[in-house]
Amino acid sequence: MVKKVFGWIMPILIVGLLLVTMGTFKRSETLTTDEQKKISDYLQANP
């Protein structure tokens, strides 16, 4: 009984986790110009 439940809960959890991580990754990929400026300033100050 428990194995049956885990059999369909685990894939859903894994897919959900992947979607969440992909979503946050995509969001962090598209930085605002202000964020990009801060990062470039930081990189220039700390080579």
Image (tube, grey):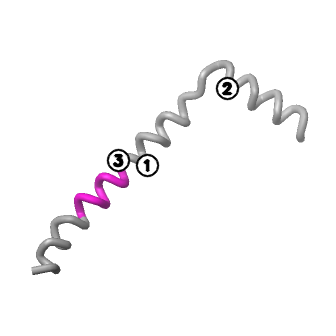
Q: Residue flagged by tag 2: what amino acid is it?
A: Glu
Residue 35 disc label: 2
* Circles 2, 1 touching at the beta carbon (< 8 Å): no
Residue furthest toward the top? 33
| Residue 2 image offset from top left, x and y in percent | 15, 79
User: Where is residue 29, by image quadrant?
Assistant: top right
Earlier-in-chain disc, 2 versus 1: 1
Is 2 rendered above or below residue 8? below
Apparent side of residue 12 relative to residue 34 in the rendered image (left or right): left
Q: Residue flagged by tag 3: what amino acid is it?
A: Leu
User: Where is residue 3, by image quadrant?
Assistant: bottom left
Which SS class for mark 3? Answer: helix
To which residue does mark 3 refer? 19
Instruction: Measure the C-alpha gap from mark 3 to mark 1.
Output: 6 Å
Apparent side of residue 36 relative to residue 46 in the rendered image (left or right): left
Is residue 27 a member of the stretch shown in magenta?
Answer: no
Magenta-highlighted stretch: main secondary structure? helix
Residue 21 disc label: 1
Which SS class for mark 1? Answer: helix
> Of 5 and 23, which appears nearest the observer?
5
Instruction: Measure the C-alpha gap from mark 2 to mark 3.
Output: 24 Å
Q: Residue flagged by tag 1: what amino acid is it?
A: Thr
| Residue 1 image offset from top left, x and y in percent | 9, 80
* Circles 3, 1 touching at the beta carbon (< 8 Å): yes
| Residue 7 image offset from top left, x and y in percent | 17, 72
* Region of the chain picked out in magenta, as a range: 11-19
Q: Residue at x 11, y 76 (%)?
A: 4
Apparent side of residue 2 relative to residue 32 in the rendered image (left or right): left
